[in-house]
Amino acid sequence: MELFRRRPPVWALILLPVLLWLGQYWQRGLWAPDEARYAYVAREMRESGEWLVMHVNGGLYPDKPPLLFWLINVVSVVFTGGEINGISARLPSLLGMIVALWAIARLAERWADAGTAWRTVLVTMTSFMIWQEGGWGRIDALLLGLVMAAVYHLFVFNDDGRRWRPLAAYGLLGLAMLAKGPVALPVALGIYIAGTLAVGEGAKLRRWHWAWGLPLAFSFLAAWLALARWVGHGPDEYFGSMVGVKFLGRVVKAEDHANPVYYYLTHFPLEFLPWTVFLPAAYVALGAGLLRRRLLAWGLFILVMFSLFSGKRQMYVLGAYPAAALLIAAAWPKFAGLSRRWTAITGWAAMGLVLLIGGAATAAAVVLNLAPAGGKLGLKIAALMADLGEVRLTWRLLSVGLLMLGGGAWLVRTFRNERLSRRWFTGFAGLNFANLVVLGAVVLPVANPLKAPLALIPEVQQRLAPGQPIYLYGRQLAIVPFYVGRPGRELRTPEEIEAVLGSEKPGMIVFMAEEWAKLEPRLASRVLTHPMRMGGKKLVWTEFPVPTAAPPAAGEAK
């Protein structure tokens, strides 16, 4: 097609992400912990008028800089009538992905050709981790977009020398630091330095932009912190936590996400699926040229750097995925030069994965529909269906199964005639794109009743007046006030609970079940308890004071 002989236009780079993710934004609720918490921080920011110092449940929130929360409020006004919901809380992620796809498409065209740019976009979007982060209302997709745009301008500056490009790059890195802190700087600059050195262009690194660019990038963060201190009147401990513990301590010496050094050796291959199976063949087919060296340096720098840190999460290495996608995209036209054994192993592994997904989804739908009522399996299925309420799961799984089985059959037939042709690639990418659309918009929303405290909403509306706070014992419960529409107030100690219970107003406190078990001997006689579940979490919500029995009416037996 004539369209694919030109680089991807901006309208296509907007349309494709909208088609991939908007259905999920519309149908899936905001889930704990990150999505709902970020949305609630943004809501509390607007309701309190504290635009420089973030709060959650009435207390300080020094975990993240403010850019995401500002953007959530802006897009809520522009697109959702001021409501912070699944769309407005995730549109910053969509913006980040659009910018990231634009940057890597332009790099792919510069380093290869327009066809490679299209393939890079499709591979990147349909790799599992990129799809997941683009669908979630978190910071990492926004960060990826800002970092990739900065990397694009730095690499292109090596070629055209236009002075405004470093200015744009460091400005974008300043915004990236306002999104997630100083970690953005070593990621982007490390990709640029490693990729430049790998192709023997180290002399191009000796530029003046280092002298003024780094201060410019840090000035964004410094300006916000200064305004937060002198205009927002943020307390001193807020800045100590923000700069010291949260930005550096979490990465260098983390406790919450501590993982072994080989963590990414197992996670990256799984989370780059379904495209992981093509990486060995792509490495061989692309050959030992400058592009392969540049992309390997790019990807390995990210994986090695974060492997050396104590704290590890899958999204930390999101910047390595575009390099892997570009490697496959650039090598694809050269797959025809591989041996028949190479293409057979690669193609059948990919088609086997497609058919496996289709078969598993179809089998699950059949089991859910035909499983006998008795026995352990039947009881578990009955319990699951009861938790899901009115949501129908069977046809949703069947839609995935039939899509993948039908698409897999077409891939097999085409592969027998054409091997790993460009038409086969388009079919494989299109099939996985369609599958991810269905998963996000049709299958994942099934879990809304499990992942959100929907059952608590009517209880709160009945017991708490509008504007009356709901109390939370534990910080990971910001999802509760977000859904029930009441301000949250965090209680940190048993003494704070005692003070609340001693007040005259009736109220509600929500506990994690394990925390309640510790406090039950002390508090059980003073509250009414109600257990509930939210996904895999067990909660206990309590009401106080305990109602007293009404005195008997006149004439009644005592």
Image: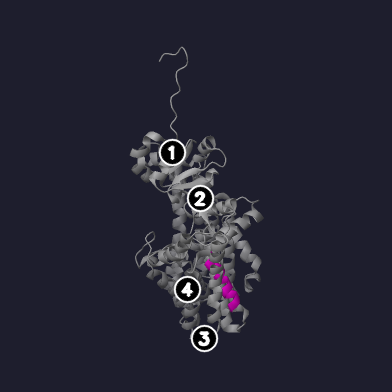
The answer to if 167 sits in the magenta stretch is: yes
254 is higher (above) or lower (below) than 164: above
Q: CA distance from mark 1 to mark 3?
A: 65 Å
Question: Which mark identifies residue 186?
Answer: 4
Q: How many marks?
A: 4
In depth, the one of 68 and 397 nearer the eye is 68
Circle on res. 501: 1
Q: Secondary structure at mark 1?
A: helix
Examine the rendering and report whether any part of residue 430 can be seen.
Answer: no
The Cα atoms of the two marked residues, 2 and 4, are separated by: 34 Å
Which quarter of the rendered picture does the N terminus lie within?
bottom right
The tag earlier along the polypeptide, 1 or 4, is 4
Is disc 1 surrounded by few (<14), some (14 to 19) or many (20+) residues within 10 Å?
many
> x and y percent of residue 368 in the render?
44, 43
Residue type beneath disc 1: Leu
Q: Is residue 535 above or below residue 38?
A: above
Characterize the local packing of mark 4: few (<14), some (14-19) or many (20 or more) Cα atoms within 10 angstroms.
few
Residue 7 is at least partly visible in this image: yes
- Give the residue number, with chain letter if any, for mark 2: 58
Chief secondary structure of the magenta portion: helix
Sequence-wise, which precedes: disc 2 or disc 4?
A: 2
Residue segment shown in magenta? 166-178
Residue at image mark 3: 206
- Label 3 secondary element: loop
Q: Give yes or no for contact between labels 1 and 4 (Cβ–Cβ under 8 Å).
A: no
